[in-house]
Image (cartoon, rainbow, N blue to C red):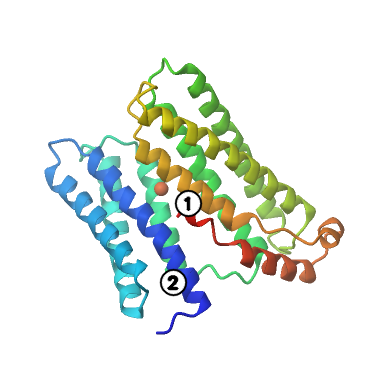
């Protein structure tokens, strides 16, 4: 199949998500204790599968490869759900909390929705709300991961992580409530633009904070067991989220809160901005 513009966008999505799932496989592999050899092997296998698929996508995205990706993601999601079930029934050793595993399952589900074209960009307001609910929730878990994996002596860094957790919870609550209010008439109102700006600014600050922390971890300046790869992973996800939500209404439409025209205008603006910078893929 020839690479149309839409397929190029899907290729960008695949490059991003396959790196994310490769990391999830790697995180799971590291989380199994020596007693869970078979599971560690399976998690490592998936990390390798997604790394390989990503390399192949870089050369093009024919239909056959696309369906192979879909099947492997679905297999991985089922495997993760099986591990989560065993974790909830205390029948497997695993050194990550269930909520962290659930977050990674959520991300596999998101990739499947994209592959199945279930998230069309017909209404950019609903698309923005979808991104908010998906990622703001995950970012609270990312702040939690930092809180869990740094040594308590790093009180200043931990205090900031606690602040970010509160901010992302507040933004999630706002997005959830706002999404319910506009459900019957999803229009581009000034409130949504403000929410987008608040969420973008907070996420950018979080990226800056994690970037600095990643350097400190790599240089062995902070105490803890937080891997630099996890920080890099969370930074990539935050960039992706910002790339998805930063569309804006034209000034007049935003302030008057009009309907269809502003939605269409936001759609055009958002479409242009949906790709994230190449350096963050
Ligand atoms: Fe992730």
Measure how far apart labels 1 and 2 are at the Cα level. Answer: 24 Å
From the Cβ of disc 1, is ligand 1 less than 8 Å away? no
Residue 190 appears at what percent x and percent y?
79, 53
How many neighbours does mark 1 have within 10 angstroms: few (below 14), some (14-19), or many (20 or more)?
Answer: few
Residue 88 appears at what percent x and percent y?
30, 41
252 with respect to 57 (left or right): right
Which of the image's four quarters has the N terminus? bottom left
Q: Is residue 210 above or below residue 220?
A: below
The residue indicated by pointer 2 is: 116
The quadrant in which residue 258 appears is bottom right
Tag in front: 1 or 2 = 1
How many neighbours does mark 2 have within 10 angstroms: few (below 14), some (14-19), or many (20 or more)?
Answer: few
For mark 1, give the secondary structure: helix
The residue indicated by pointer 1 is: 280
For mark 2, give the secondary structure: loop
Identify the mark at residue 154; answer none if there is no mark.
Answer: none
Q: Residue at x 54, y 36 (%)?
A: 208
The quadrant in which residue 92 appears is top left
Q: Residue at x 52, y 76 (%)?
A: 5
Closer to us: 170 or 139: 139
195 with respect to 274 (left or right): right
* Count of picture labels: 2
Closer to us: 270 or 147: 270
Residue 162 appears at what percent x and percent y?
53, 27
Give the residue furthest to the bottom: 1
Which of the image's four quarters has the C terminus? bottom left
Give the residue furthest to the top: 153
Q: Residue at x 51, y 53 (%)?
A: 240
Residue 9 appears at what percent x and percent y?
50, 69
Q: Is residue 264 above or below residue 254?
A: below
**Residue 113 visible in this rendered orientation of the protein:** no
Query: Disc 1 or 2, which lies upstream in sequence?
Result: 2
């Amino acid at each position: 199949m020839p690479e149309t513009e839409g397929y190029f966008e899907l290729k960008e999505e695949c490059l991003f998500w396959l790196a994310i799932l490769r990391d999830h496989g790697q995180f799971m592999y590291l989380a199994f204790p020596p007693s869970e050899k078979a599971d560690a092997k399976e998690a490592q296998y998936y990390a390798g599968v997604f790394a390989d698929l990503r390399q192949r996508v870089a050369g093009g995205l024919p239909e056959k490869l696309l369906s192979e990706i879909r099947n492997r993601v679905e297999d991985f999601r089922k495997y993760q759900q099986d591990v989560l079930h065993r974790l909830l029934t205390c029948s497997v050793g695993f050194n990550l909390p269930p909520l962290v595993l659930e977050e990674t399952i959520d991300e596999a589900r998101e990739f499947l929705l994209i592959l199945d074209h279930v998230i069309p960009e017909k209404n950019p307001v609903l698309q923005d709300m979808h991104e908010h609910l998906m990622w703001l929730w995950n970012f609270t878990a990312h702040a939690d991961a930092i809180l869990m994996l740094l040594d308590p002596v790093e009180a200043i860094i931990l205090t900031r992580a606690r602040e970010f957790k509160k901010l992302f919870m507040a933004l999630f609550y706002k997005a959830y409530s706002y999404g319910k209010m506009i459900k019957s008439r999803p229009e581009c109102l000034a409130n949504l633009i403000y929410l987008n700006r608040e969420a973008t600014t907070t996420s950018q600050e979080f990226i800056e904070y994690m970037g600095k922390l990643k350097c400190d971890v790599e240089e062995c300046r902070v105490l803890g067991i937080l891997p630099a790869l996890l920080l890099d992973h969370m930074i990539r996800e935050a960039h992706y989220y910002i790339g998805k939500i930063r569309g804006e209404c034209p000034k007049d439409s935003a302030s008057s809160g009009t309907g269809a025209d502003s939605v269409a205008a936001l759609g055009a603006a958002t479409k242009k901005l949906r790709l994230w910078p190449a350096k963050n893929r």
